[in-house]
Image (spheres, grey):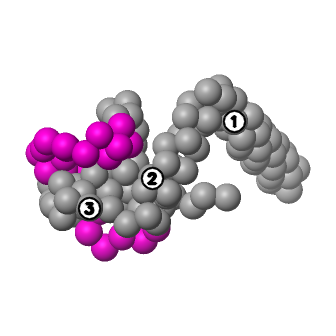
Amino acid sequence: MRITYKQKCSRCKKNFVLVTWKNKYPLCYECQKNEMQGEIKDPETKKLFNIPEEFYKENSFLRSVKINYLKYGQLSEKQVEFFKKTVQKMKEEQGTPKTVAPEPIQFESNISLRALRLAKKEAKEKKAKEKREK
Ligand SMILES: [Zn+2]
């Protein structure tokens, strides 16, 4: 299972960034947008980075790889491999509809409804008891 953390962007302190590992200085898409601009000459790399902009918005790892490449002009095999894997995963996740949300929410509201009813019942019984004692 992938664990994601939501952290506030360390530059603008406004937007939240989803990171898959604890990151001391996470940066949001808006703040990194400018750094991701640049010409990529290598056709292989160009192809690698040619993914939907949404993916860069969602994933700080993909952003960091692209920025690294633009800064240093090269990538390690591991970076390329992980980049491809991440993109593949995101494509798969995009293809499957998200159906998880409604159930747990309903479950929670059921519990709180029950708790509310129970509390009301208890209050009623207490009142009735007080009346009897008078
Ligand atoms: Zn930011």
Q: Is residue 39 magenta?
A: yes
Compared to residue 72, the image places residue 110 above or below, namely: above
Q: Quadrant of residue 40?
A: top left
Q: What residue would you read off at disc 3?
A: 74
Please state the horizontal and vertical placement of residue 32, each as a whole percent of the image: 19, 50
| Label 1 packing within 10 angstroms: few (<14), some (14-19), many (20+) | few
State the CA–CA distance, disc 2 to disc 1. Answer: 27 Å
| Label ID, residue 116 | none
List x then y, in percent, for residue 74.
26, 61
Q: Across the whole image, how many numbered discs are drawn on residues?
A: 3
| Residue at (76% x, 44% y) in the render | 111
Residue type at tag 2: Phe
The tag on residue 83 is 2
Q: Amino acid at mark 1?
A: Val
Mark 2 and mark 1 lie on one chain; the one further toward the N terminus is 2
Q: Residue at x 67, y 58 (%)?
A: 1
Mark nearest the camera among 3 and 1 is 3
> Which residue is nearer to you in this view: 87 or 31?
87
Give the image location of residue 11, x and y in percent: 15, 60
* Secondary structure found at label 2: helix
Mark 2 close to ligand 1, CB under 8 Å: no
* Camera-side residue of 21 and 34: 34
Task: Estimate the spatial distance between the alpha carbons at disc 2 and disc 3, rounded to whole Å.
Answer: 14 Å
Single out the mark in the foreground, 2 or 1.
2
Quarter-of-image position of residue 92: top right
Disc 2 and disc 3 in contact, CB within 8 angstroms: no
Residue 60 visible in this rendered orientation of the protein: no
Q: Earlier in the sequence, mark 2 or mark 3?
A: 3
Labels 2, 3: front one: 3
Identify the element where label 3 is drawn.
Answer: loop
Residue 134 x, y percent position in the rendering: 81, 53
